[in-house]
Image (cartoon, rainbow, N blue to C red):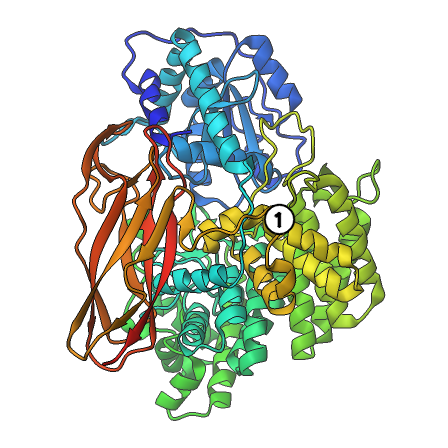
Amino acid sequence: MPIRSLIPVLALASGVMAQEPSMSADVDGRNRLGDETSPYLLQHRNNPVHWWPWGPEAFAAARAADKPIFLSVGYSTCYWCHVMERESFENEAIAALMNELFVCIKLDREERPDVDDLYMSAVQIFQRGSGGWPMSVFLEPEGLKPFYGGTYYPPTDARGRPGFPSVLRQLRQAWDQNRDALQQQANQVAEAVAQQLAQRSEARVVGAAEIEGGIAQLLAGYDGTHGGFGRQRKFPMPANLDFLILAGWDRPPVRAAVIHTLDRMATGGLYDQVGGGFHRYTVDEKWLVPHFEKMLYDNGQLVQTYTEAYRRTADPFYARIIRETLDYVLREMTAPSGAFFSAQDAESNHREGESYIWTVDELTAALTAAGLGDDVAFALTAYGFDLGPNFQDPHHPEDGPKNVVFLVDRPDRQAKAMNMTVEAFEERLGRIDRALLAVRDRRDQPLTDDKILTAWNGLMIAGMADAGATLGEERYVEAARCAARYILTGMRPANAPDGLLRTSRNGRAKIDAFLEDYANMIHGLLALNRATAEREWLDAAVDLAAAARARFWDESGGAYYDTLRNQADLFVRIKSTYDGAVPSGNGVMLENLVDLHEATGEEAYLDDAIATVAALSGPLAQHPTGSVKSLIAVKRLVDRYPDRLAKPAGAPTPAPGMSGPVTVGVSEKRVTVADGATAELGVVLVIEPGFHVNAHVPGAEDLIALDIELVGAENLTLSVTYPPGERFTGPVGSMLVHHGTLTVPVGITRAGPVTPQARLLVTYQVCTDEVCLAPHTEVLAVDIVAP
């Protein structure tokens, strides 16, 4: 389904309408969120919007009234969700318009990740790859298919962008006057989403090449200055680090990239230096200014990542980060039942990060009041206050500049610069942190989302168990036991006691669990079994694996569906492979299957693992780092069971460099380059008839351009002479593309000693006249020889 061809249909809903839309009677006007358990939904229970929770009653009301649905999706710690609520959903006039024109449904994405995934894919089609929360989607009521979607909308028209009331009026006008066209668009989008989330791909051989490709792709995006991957906002992405540790630790450049990233995350504002625990991400490339929400899933995964790094380095700084993070979770994110809460908000009193940030005067007063006046100068230096303020709330400039607390450098390096022992530096910093935390705890605190999610608890159970065993801290292992017992006893469906429920709050557990819940809980139980050697946890993992297989396994295609069969509120049954902030259920289950085979000796688990790899091999071969959790399992299978991965059943043996309708190669796989000289060769793309590849400068916005990079080689530079392309008119207008056989001349110039092999990353997107495949990066090896 071509993304671009869908966009022009939106003209039906985006032009200025001359007439007012028809006003249908409101449906039993009241807000129905008061009986929900989700903190996010309860935040909206007093809105003048007549919200319905997601469910059959809301769908029936929309069908009875013949009204389209407005679906608003968010979560309790989402800053821009709060903003849109204050600006629009609490506004009486806007709420009245919403109630008149639509049946309005509010959904917590953390309770229903399946619904969120489905409609986020649609929003990304409408918004040309962009998405986020709050997510605003407009559905036809019969099949719940989306005919338009976006994210945050301001309350008024501004700077050429329509405000939320204008969007509401225009879409309802289009619904009343052009319903057939909108229904056709909804069907097209639903088909496109179904192809993206549920289509099967032909099995391929995967193994060492995909592992090498994954390493190369990650290193190509590595920020050598600040650590991490990418050049703008920085997310921790623990699965990427886990993969590099497993697959590339013995390679100095990979090991250096991992250590640098771990150090910068732990010293930066991403990490809560005073109270422990990691924030969601930073808004800058330096890991300095965070988006202040804290998520259980981030902290559970990062504890495991730092624990593995500690096992390999014995770095006491990593041990401190692990302990402080877990102590924060036990202090602020643990229910009386022993299970773990979901998240903490980014704001208090409508101020982003208000409870976390400081001025010099506030820090000085806090330490002086605690009798630590002699430590003020030390704290100002160690925590970067001497460098000036680093945070200004853009929404409240009247608050003035303040400081996010960060460590200027690792403790061992700072101690050396201050002519102190590391022990003395750490002891002094520790008492400063305790004094600051005592003051901070008296401030107004961000909301804690105290619902218990099975999947996220599984991640933290694994972190607690793994770290406790590695550090010799029994209290962390015991915390893992307590949480596991609660999930296994308190979150079971009454009608299916072998299964799990997704969410619980105040003793009310509900919603049948999804694949990610089973997968992450099994992951946690297996970690607990390794930490304790207690058989009950392995037995529980085995039982849940059987329950997951019965509910989600695809008998005809292999691998697991994300959702239960016959869910009436989904227009497609999803089978995802992409790892986001929470890794895909298939990726986690794949590694679980390897673990279960090794823990029990049962061949059936290994058989299912091989079948899962075959089912996921298309996405793995096309974009290894998009499914990096699965790639971790593939690495383990390659290392331990290479014969089983040699050729999965039904997999053809592809030609080298073959990726769908394009074959990619180099004219010379071995080049001789003298110091100061340049070797010329060609990157060759053979494009099958009926397909084309976008040119390097395609001439239209948002297209994936042909691009060639050189990675993994010191003292080599690359020059590329891109052919201009042929003119083609497609869904987005005139553009430049390539057909047939394309040779791109490249030059590799040497300036000093070189490594024996370089890698060329060739990124391209293949399209027909109407449809585009997902972008692909091919990794080509070139041997470099000195004369």
Q: Quadrant of residue 288?
A: bottom left
Tell me if residue 142 can be seen: yes
The number of numbered badges drawn on the structure is: 1
Where residue 247 sits in the image (x, y, percent)?
Answer: 52, 69
Answer with left or right where residue 305 lies relative to residue 780: right
Q: Residue at x 39, y 75 (%)?
A: 253
Query: x and y percent of residue 369 in the render?
Result: 47, 74
Q: Which picture quadrant has residue 162? A: top left
Is residue 43 in sight in this rendering?
no
Q: Position of residue 344 (x, y in %)?
A: 55, 52
Residue 417 or residue 538, whichever sits in front:
538
Residue under numbered circle 1 = 585
Secondary structure of residue under mark 1: helix
Q: Residue at x 63, y 15 (%)?
A: 60
Q: Is residue 4 above or below residue 747?
A: above
User: For the point 24% across and 76% down, which residue is it?
Assistant: 715
